[in-house]
Structure formats: structure tokens, C-alpha cells
Image (tube, rainbow, N blue to C red):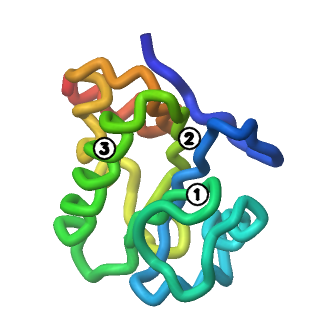
Amino acid sequence: MKNITPDYITQLNPDEIFVFGSNSEGNHAGGAARQAMQFGAVWGQGNGLQGQTYAIPTMFAHESKIEPFVDDFISYAIRNPQLKFFVTRIGCGIAGFKEKQIAPMFERVKTEKIENVSLPKEFWEVIEQNNL
């Protein structure tokens, strides 16, 4: 079963985490990063858990630099099954990457059946299209 992140998240339950793309400096001025501020994102923190958010740095010249941060996030989600993570279209807004570049980094969610991670429908489409 695949869990799909809602297109718009305006509130979170206490056990839910908003996962967003950030820059390394944690300047949460635009896109999902700006929205994350309402859920406790910390200005100046560009990676990891903060409030009811989890930042994944995405502002790099090449998408391969993002993958270790995605792996860290997935490991964190596995260690915290009591939490529900809503991954936004990280890297596909201001950072300028395409879903086909970012979505494969999350294929472990499917192959390892990680039930507490929801992905955007666009990411699921790429994962299923690529038979990942």
C-alpha cells in the first residue's frame, strides 16, 4: 500500500511530521520551507528534525548531493515508527530538479514497505513507472 502526501497541508496531528526541502543554511524563505515555519522549522537549521518538520537540503548543483540526506531521513523514519512523515516534492520547486531526478531516491519506501512515510503522488508515479 502506498501512502500519498496531501497536496496541501495546513495542520498536523501531534505525531505527524512535515518533510520539506531546504537550503543548507536553513533560510526558510520560500516554497515548502516557508510553510514549514508554521510547523516549527528553525531559521538557520537546514537539516534534520525541528519542531514538527524534517528538513532535507536540496539546494545543490547536482541531485546526487541530496541522496545522502534522503537516506538519513529514511533511516530516521524507520527508527521512529510512531511518527507519520509527509514528504513534500522536495527539490522540485525552487531547487529546480524534476520528479524523475528526486523520486528514485525514495524507492526504499516502496521496497522496504515503510508504512509511516507518505510520498507525493508525482514521486509514486515515477517510482511505479520505473518499476522501482
Q: Against 45, is 39 above or below?
A: above
Residue at the extreme right of the image, as rendered = 10
Mark found first going from the N terminus, 1 or 2 = 1
Residue 13 located left or right of residue 41: right
* Residue under label 1: 53
Q: CA distance from mark 1 to mark 2?
A: 9 Å
Q: Classify 10 Å Cα crowding around label 1: few (below 14), some (14-19), many (20 and above).
A: many
Q: Classify 10 Å Cα crowding around label 3: few (below 14), some (14-19), many (20 and above).
A: some
Amino acid at pointer 1: Thr
Mark found first going from the N terminus, 1 or 3 = 1
* Residue under label 2: 86
Question: Residue at left 75%, top 45%?
Answer: 9
Per the image, label 3 sits on a secondary structure element best described as helix
Question: Residue at left 40%, top 37%?
Answer: 80
Residue 92 in sight in this render: no
Q: Please state, as top left, top right, bottom left or bottom right, where the C terminus lies in the image.
A: top left
Amino acid at pointer 2: Phe
* Residue under label 3: 74
Mark found first going from the N terminus, 3 or 2 = 3
Residue 89 in sight in this render: yes
Q: CA distance from mark 3 to mark 2?
A: 12 Å
Residue 2 located left or right of residue 74: right
Question: Residue at left 50%, top 29%?
Answer: 82
Q: Classify 10 Å Cα crowding around label 2: few (below 14), some (14-19), many (20 and above).
A: many
How far across and how far down the image is residue 42, in percent?
61, 77
Q: Please state, as top left, top right, bottom left or bottom right, where the N terminus lies in the image.
A: top left
How far across and how far down the image is residue 99, in percent?
39, 50
Tell which of 98 and 85 is nearer to you. 85
Tell which of 23 and 121 is nearer to you. 23
